[in-house]
Amino acid sequence: MYGGSGVQGKRDMAMEYEAQIPVLRPSIHSRRANMMVKFQDLYEFTVEGNVDDVNVLNEVREKVRHQGKVWWALEADKGANWYLESFVPSTLLKSSLKFSTLVNAITLKKLIRKGIPPNLRPKVWFSLSGAAKKKSTVPDSYYNDLISAVEHKVTPATKQIDHDLPRTFPGHPWLDTPEGHASLRRVLVGYSFRDSDVGYCQGLNYVAALLLVVMKTEEEAFWMLAVLLENVLVSDCYTTNLSGCHVEQRVFKDLLTKKCPRIAAHLGALEFDVSLVCTEWFLCLFSKSLPSETTLRVWDVLFYEGAKVLFSVALAIFKMNEEELLVTHHVGDVINVIQRSTHYLFDPDELLTVAFEKIGFMITTNISKQRKKQEPAVMAALDQRIRRLNSLNDDEKS
C-alpha cells in the first residue's frame, strides 16, 4: 500500500492521495439556474443534488484532504501503525492506563470522529474493528476453503441472495456488474454458512456491498462483516425473527423520549411508529439512507466506539429536523421530512456534531441495560405474533 521509503515516500503518497479527491465543477448553466445535477462521489455512487449541495460536498472534500495530511503526518512521525499503539479496548480499565496512553487514545478518538482518510480506511478499519484479530484465529485458507465448500450448495438463503443481488446499489459501475454480483454473492453466501443462525437477512446485502467497495478485497470484506455481526452489533439483529432489531427499535424510542421530548410527544400524538424509518437504519447501518461518504464517516466511529453510535446518529437525524417535524400533521409528512433530510445529508460533520455534542454522551453499559429491559416484551410480542399466525393457518385448513 505504501510506495517509496521513509518520509519522502509518505509525502509522495499523500500528494497522490490528494489528487484522487477531485473538486466537483457543475456547468455554468447549472450554477446559474441552480439546477439538479448528477455526479459521482468518491466511491463512484451516483449522487443527485443542486449547486448548493455540490458546494457542501466540495467543502467536505477539502476537509478530507486536510485530514489526509494530518494522518500522513502522524504516519511519518510515529510509524505506519501508530493508531494500534493508541487503541484502548473498551474492556480495559482506564484507571490502569499510563497517562500518555490515555492521551493518545483520546487523540485517536477525536481523529476518527473527524474521519479516516479513504485510502487509509481499509487498514484502519481492519485493525481497530477486531477483524484482523478474528481472521488470525483461523487458518489462512479459511475463506477460500469456505467458498469452495459451499460453491454449488442451494439453500433458502442462497436463493434470497440471488434475488437481491441486482437490487443492491443498481447503477454502481462495479457492484452492478457480473463481477461485482459474483463477489458480493460469495461474501454473503460464505457468511450464511459460517453462521446458520443468521443465514442471510435482507439489509446485509447493502452492508456487505459497501464493505466490498471500501475494503477492495472479498476476504477482508468477509471478515469485516463477521466482526460486525459477531462483535460490534447486538446479537439476533439479523436472525429470522429480527428480535435484536426489534429490541433496538424499543431502546431507540425510549432514548428519543429522553433526548428529544418535544419530538417524541408530537410523534406520539400522530401515532407515528419510529420503526417506519429506523428499521432500515439499523438493518442497513444507514447505507441505504445516507450518502455513501456520510455513511462511511458514521462507520468510522461505529467500528471504533461500537453500536451505541447508531443511536446517537439516529437521534441526531431527528434532532436536526426538529422544527420541521413539529409542524407535521400526518405520518406521511414525518416520513417525507426524514427521508428528504437523509438523502441530502452530504455534510457528515454537521450530522456527527449534533450526534456527539447536542445529543450528549451515550454509555454502552446503559444501552445494554435498556436492551435487557426490552427483551422480554419483544419476545412476548413475537411469540404472540406466531400464535396468531398459527391460529389463522388452522382456520384456513378447517
Image (spheres, grey):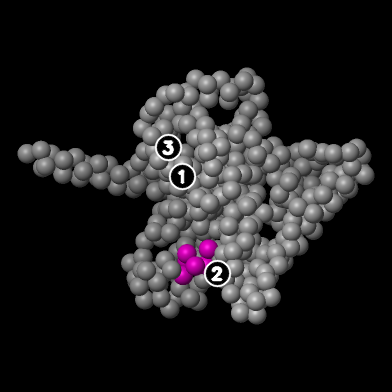
Viewer can see residue 12? yes
Report x, y in % for residue 177. 54, 42
Give the magenta range. 337-343
Nearer the observer: mark 2 or 3; the answer is 3
Q: Secondary structure at mark 3?
A: helix
Q: Quadrant of the C terminus?
A: top left
Identified at 65% across, 39% down, the residue is 216
10 Å crowding of disc 1: few (<14), some (14-19), many (20+): some
* Residue type at tag 2: Met
Residue 195, image x, y percentages: 47, 29
Q: Is residue 343 above or below residue 17?
A: below
Kindly identify which residue carries mark 3: 162
Which residue is under mark 1?
A: 166
Front-most of 334 and 385?
Answer: 334
Residue to which mark 2 is pinned: 320
Q: Quadrant of residue 304?
A: top right
Q: CA distance from mark 2 to mark 3?
A: 38 Å
Q: Quadrant of residue 376?
A: top left
Q: Position of residue 58 (x, y in %)?
A: 71, 65
